[in-house]
């Protein structure tokens, strides 16, 4: 069961829990009774697509997160109950009014280049990178007005209003702490250290041979003594899904990150004697799949056209035929299992091709020669063949109502540029992480202030609607939880009414890994977290 994160706005302090804290984070314990952990060795991970950069605090694509979470730490890590546990912060205190959090930082942490980690790094990362560059940062940390550094090992967050959402965002896979001495005074996105990162994490960057592999090596000076257990991680970039499956089945790789094989292969692999197909570890991400319109291109400025597309797409058939049951139809921008926030009573667009045709007629898009009303393009996200097959599903569905769809595909760096810098598309489909709180993952897709050219995973549709902005900004400053939840429910209704994007599916992501791996994290963000606890069993 997915659980929403709940902030307890009372004074609290958590002391470092060492290995007990890691146990609380939810880890696999070994493939068979009597197995023992074997330190050392190399873990080979199949990865696709190749990331555009290796700093998830800047580029939040899933491959970037999967790699960089091994190189960088966050202030906290969330356990299986969404409770924050110490990481770079060994303890913290929240003021009674919720307007400040004082973090006591570890004193035994160094950057991989030997420079000491200090509160100045925290201040720089939150104020200059997360709030300004991170696609979700300006919404999540909207009320963070300052980070004070009274000494090198204390960072005090000052808020204009209580901000319960920040705890779910301080997880190391979301808000990474970057080295100020390498980034200050530069454009973080263009900084060359983004491709050869220096972090505080369990593994040190060794090399990146583009199109082939990314290699990380054990950090011998890691603050969490006894970790990591592995000597090396090799991320192999393998574009073909069938080849990734074969590599895992042959034992040439031991781990496949997010949806590493074709969805069609998952049922067979569930019966493997050597491999595990695991859906746990993505609860925090809460992946949602959508179909976007470029709101600054005609005819998508006409709500009737957007509604027609929504009525033309059969979500149930999409979940069954393309996602092989690893998805459920969505009813809005927030997944149904986030019970504290979910609104079941939002405007819906049932599968109804006849209604779709009537709406297009009403919008003046009559059928012409060959029965074609409209010719447009579509760009699916660059995350593999399953997303291209989904685009073919849309092509066939829209053809029935007289819309001719041309599918354009790209590698990941080009895709990110086309969608988030050039805005060179008519329609676009991808997934996003809703996260434990909508302010983290959802609002960036609907808020006009999240139209940030060159920032991946921001407001690509370029919707700028005053009704959406009003409710989003009210959520950001709401202090009373019941008032805030009511606003979030209203936001869902407004988003469905305005329809800058069709929310299609609630996805179920999975990992594939060898059964002799021990220490796999099942925490809410375990699918992306560091491999520092992983070893082989003998």
Image (spheres, helix red, strand yellow):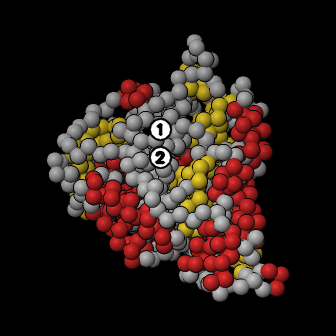
Left or right, 187 with respect to 259, comes to left
Residue 388 seen in the figure: no
Query: Tags 1 and 2 in contact by the CB under 8 Å rule?
Result: yes
- Residue at screen point 43% across, 74% down: 448
Tell me which numbered mark, 1 or 2, is placed earlier along the sequence: 1
Q: Quarter-wise, where is residue 307 in the image? A: bottom right
Quarter the C terminus occupies: top right
Q: Would you identify the image quadrant in which residue 158 lies?
A: bottom left
Where in the figure is residue 468, as x and y percent of width and height? 41, 71
The residue sitting at 78% across, 38% down in the picture is 246
Residue occupied by mark 1: 1
> For this view, does 344 lie left or right of residue 125?
right
- Which residue, as the protein is rendered here, is positioned at the far top? 34
Q: CA distance from mark 1 to mark 2?
A: 8 Å
Q: Position of residue 56 (x, y in %)?
A: 50, 54
- At horizontal 18% and vertical 48% (from top left) the residue drawn is 95
Residue extending furthest toward the right: 370
Q: Position of residue 452 (x, y in %)?
A: 47, 72
Residue annotated with mark 2: 337
Residue 457 or residue 202, whichever sits in front: 457
Q: Residue at x 59, y 59 (%)?
A: 504
Q: Is residue 218 left or right of residue 119?
A: right
The local crowd at label 2, few if under 14, some if 14 to 19, many if 20 or more residues have their Cα within 10 Å, is some
Q: Could you say which disc has been placed on residue 59 in the image?
A: none
17 is higher (above) or lower (below) than 392: above
Q: Say what secondary structure mark 1 lies in.
A: loop
Instruction: Determine if residue 284 is in view.
Output: yes
- Local SS, label 2: loop
Identify which residue, 14 or 186, lies in the foreground.
14
Q: How many marks?
A: 2
Crowding around mark 1 (Cα neighbors within 10 Å: few <14, some 14 to 19, many 20+) is few
């Amino acid at each position: 069961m997915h659980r929403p994160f709940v902030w307890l706005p009372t004074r609290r302090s958590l002391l470092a829990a060492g290995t007990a804290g890691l146990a609380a984070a939810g880890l696999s314990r070994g493939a068979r009774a009597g197995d023992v952990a074997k330190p050392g060795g190399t873990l080979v991970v199949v990865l696709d697509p190749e990331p555009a950069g290796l700093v998830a605090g800047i580029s939040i694509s899933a491959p970037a997160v999967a790699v960089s979470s091994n190189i960088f730490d966050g202030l906290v890590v969330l356990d299986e109950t969404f409770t924050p546990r110490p990481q770079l912060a060994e303890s913290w205190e929240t003021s009674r009014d919720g307007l400040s959090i004082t973090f006591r930082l570890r004193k035994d942490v160094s950057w991989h280049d030997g420079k000491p980690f200090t509160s100045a790094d925290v201040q720089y990362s939150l104020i200059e990178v997360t709030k300004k560059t991170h696609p979700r940062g300006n919404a999540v940390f909207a009320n963070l007005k300052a980070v004070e550094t009274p000494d090198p090992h204390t960072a005090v967050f000052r808020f204009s209003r209580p901000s319960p959402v920040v705890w779910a965002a301080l997880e190391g896979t979301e808000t990474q702490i970057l080295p100020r001495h390498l980034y200050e005074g530069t454009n973080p996105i263009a900084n060359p250290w983004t491709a050869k990162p220096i972090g505080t994490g369990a593994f040190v960057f060794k090399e990146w041979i583009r199109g082939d592999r990314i290699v990380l090596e054990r950090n011998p000076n890691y603050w969490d003594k006894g970790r990591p257990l592995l000597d090396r991680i090799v991320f192999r970039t393998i574009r073909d899904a069938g080849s990734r499956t074969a590599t895992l089945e042959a034992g040439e790789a031991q781990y496949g990150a997010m949806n590493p094989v074709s969805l069609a292969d998952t049922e067979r692999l569930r019966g493997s004697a050597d491999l595990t197909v695991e859906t746990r570890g993505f609860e925090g991400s809460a992946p949602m799949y959508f179909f976007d319109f470029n709101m600054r291109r005609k005819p998508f400025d006409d709500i009737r056209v957007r509604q027609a597309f929504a009525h033309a797409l059969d979500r149930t058939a999409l979940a069954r035929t393309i996602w092989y049951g690893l998805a459920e139809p969505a009813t809005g921008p927030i997944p149904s299992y986030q019970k504290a926030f979910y609104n079941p009573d939002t405007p819906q667009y049932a599968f109804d091709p006849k209604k779709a045709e009537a709406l297009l007629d009403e919008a003046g898009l009559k059928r012409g020669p060959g029965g074609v009303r409209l010719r447009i393009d579509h760009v699916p996200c660059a995350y593999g063949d399953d997303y291209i097959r989904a685009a073919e599903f849309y092509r066939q569905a829209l053809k029935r109502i007289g819309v001719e769809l041309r599918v354009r595909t790209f590698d990941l760096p080009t895709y990110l540029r086309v969608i988030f810098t050039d805005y060179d598309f008519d329609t676009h489909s991808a997934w996003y992480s809703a996260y434990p709180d909508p302010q983290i993952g959802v609002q960036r897709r609907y808020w006009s202030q999240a139209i940030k050219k060159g920032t991946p995973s921001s407001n690509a549709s370029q919707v700028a609607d005053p009704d959406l902005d009003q409710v989003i900004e009210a959520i950001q400053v709401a202090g009373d939880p019941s008032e805030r939840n009511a606003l979030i429910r209203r936001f869902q209704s407004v988003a469905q009414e305005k329809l800058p994007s069709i929310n299609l599916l609630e996805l179920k992501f999975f990992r594939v890994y060898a059964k002799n791996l021990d220490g796999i994290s099942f925490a809410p963000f375990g699918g992306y977290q560091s491999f520092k606890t992983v070893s082989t069993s003998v």
